[in-house]
Image: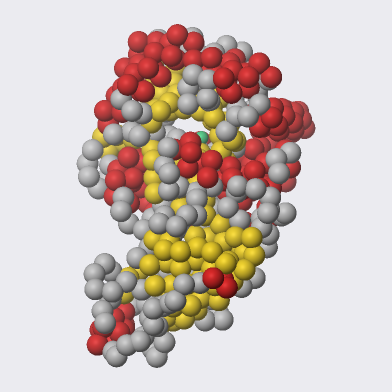
């Protein structure tokens, strides 16, 4: 009987005590087991050693994997409005070995750990389709783009813990500042080094990253993005991000003049062709209608925010397979800042009216897109906007407020994000797939607020 245990949060269990616990388990006579205590801790039976459930024990590879069956949960997978109750999921070696009705469980090996999941609902680990891992968010979010690289990389570590505790397993990073990576020394978008260092470590989110924003000079604060002057510069800058290792390209289609797209359809199409030829996708920030129209016509793979869409643009999106990444909660958080801050841009009545109008159009845009058959994926914009990394549930609530059915909103935060990324394992629960499971209390198919009540993340 083998298996050693490492804890991703060494502050919880001092390393020396953990080593003693591991040795004791390795030497002990089987079957040993791990149980979930009523206080919300994992505990090795027969020992005093335990850790919080949001930092699951990690069984090192080799010898014998621990099997766990999560028994008698409800299951919501975002494929329809029906909650399936009385379900069990058997997990072995971090993979889903079996999923079905509790009464049909296959014979369990003697060392299988049984977790009573009754009363909870299991969903797939969520996908935040619009995130900025290196930035902290909050009402002063823009200022933090200029924090030192060391600080930004440390922020990413904090965000990883926030994401996991909220049940978000995939982060699609749509922009990070350039800088000298404090760990590997490379000069590049800082999220790329973060992504590489987290790769293959289950305690971290899976990351796909766009590198740095590519924009027309004057669109974003100087020094934050890779600024270009024309279409040739746009293609070169996009290719440069892919050369650095970006998984996809992030363009900025709001320009210095808000009423005019900063690039033409043919300029954007040239970027799409270059990226697609290299197997990469292209997404575009779009807060205003003119850029949305250009992006949809040029056939980018997705529009971010899409706060100002109309029926012509959503028809183009549907025809050209352009997904929408919604970030409605950004506007909701700005509304809340009129009460929680003294910042004039949120507090002054004309600005509040402006935010309210933008919110109305943004909700209408989501409705139009969904009705037209456009794929809708949910994002927080945490870091690059004002939300924090553990608030994807807020976006799901906003999508329901905008008019989506709760199951559609759940799909936006799970399987649709996987589809947007082209990752078949992201945001779904299937036999043979990774055991990225989130257990919440409540029924997310009738009440999206259930997603705030995370009990267990595996
Ligand atoms: Zn953003």
Reply above or below: 402 against 241: below
Q: Is residue 287 left or right of residue 54?
A: right
Name which residue lies at 41% across and 42% down. Answer: 423
Residue nearest the viewer, comparing 75 with 260: 75
Residue 382 visible in image: no
Q: Is residue 265 visible?
A: yes
Query: As drawn, is 46 to the left or to the right of 449?
Result: left
* Relative image position of residue 343 (x, y in whole percent): 65, 38
Is the residue 94 above or below the residue 30 in the image? above
Query: How many labels sit on residues?
Result: 0
Q: Which quadrant, please, contains the N terminus?
A: bottom left
Give the image location of residue 178, x and y in percent: 34, 33
Instruction: Find residue 223 and report its image quarter.
Output: top left
In this rendering, position of residue 111 left or right of residue 400: left
Q: Going 35% across and 65% down the picture, which residue do you hit?
A: 93
In the image, residue 399 above or below residue 224? below
Residue in the picture at 57% in, 33% down: 375
Q: Residue at x 26, y 79 (%)?
A: 2
Q: Nearer the viewer, residue 133 or 5?
A: 5
């Amino acid at each position: 009987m083998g298996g050693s245990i490492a804890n991703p949060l060494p502050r919880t269990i001092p390393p020396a005590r953990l080593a003693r616990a591991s040795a004791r388990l390795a030497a002990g006579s089987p079957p040993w087991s791990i149980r979930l205590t009523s206080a919300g801790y994992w505990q090795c039976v027969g020992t005093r050693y335990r850790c919080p459930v949001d930092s699951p024990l990690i069984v090192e590879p080799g010898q014998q994997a621990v099997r766990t069956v999560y028994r008698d949960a409800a299951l919501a997978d975002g494929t329809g409005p029906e909650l399936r109750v009385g379900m069990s999921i058997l997990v072995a070696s971090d993979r889903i070995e079996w999923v079905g009705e509790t009464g049909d469980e296959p014979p369990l090996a003697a060392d299988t750990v049984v977790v009573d999941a009754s009363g909870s609902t299991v969903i797939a680990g969520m996908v935040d389709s619009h995130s900025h891992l290196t930035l902290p968010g909050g009402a002063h979010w823009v200022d933090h783009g200029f924090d030192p690289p060391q600080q930004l990389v440390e922020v990413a570590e904090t965000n990883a813990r926030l994401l996991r505790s909220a049940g978000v397993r995939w982060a699609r990073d749509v922009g990070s500042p350039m800088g000298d990576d404090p760990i590997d020394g490379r000069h590049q978008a800082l999220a790329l080094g973060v992504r590489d260092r987290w790769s293959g470590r289950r305690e971290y989110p899976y990351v796909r990253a766009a590198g740095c924003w590519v924009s027309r000079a004057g669109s974003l604060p100087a020094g934050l993005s890779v600024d270009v002057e024309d279409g040739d510069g746009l293609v070169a800058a996009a290719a440069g991000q892919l050369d650095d290792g970006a998984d996809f390209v992030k363009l900025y289609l709001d320009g210095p003049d808000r009423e005019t797209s900063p690039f033409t359809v043919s300029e954007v199409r040239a970027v799409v062709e270059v990226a697609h030829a290299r197997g990469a996708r292209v997404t575009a920030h779009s807060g205003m209608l003119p850029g949305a129209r250009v992006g949809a016509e040029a056939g980018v793979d997705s529009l971010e925010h899409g706060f100002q869409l109309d029926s012509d643009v959503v028809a183009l999106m549907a025809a050209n397979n352009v997904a929408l990444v919604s970030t409605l909660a950004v506007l909701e958080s700005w509304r809340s800042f009129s009460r929680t801050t003294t910042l004039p841009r949120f507090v002054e009545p004309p600005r509040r009216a402006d935010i309210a109008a933008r919110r109305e159009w943004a909700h209408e845009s989501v409705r139009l897109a969904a009705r037209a058959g456009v794929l809708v994926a949910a994002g927080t914009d945490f870091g690059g906007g004002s939300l924090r990394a553990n608030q994807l549930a807020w976006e799901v609530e906003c999508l329901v407020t905008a008019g989506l059915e709760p199951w559609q909103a759940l799909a936006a935060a799970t399987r649709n994000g996987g589809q947007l990324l082209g990752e078949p394992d992201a945001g779904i629960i299937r036999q043979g797939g990774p055991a990225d499971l989130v257990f919440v209390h409540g029924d997310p198919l009738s009440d999206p607020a259930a997603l705030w009540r995370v009990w267990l993340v595996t």
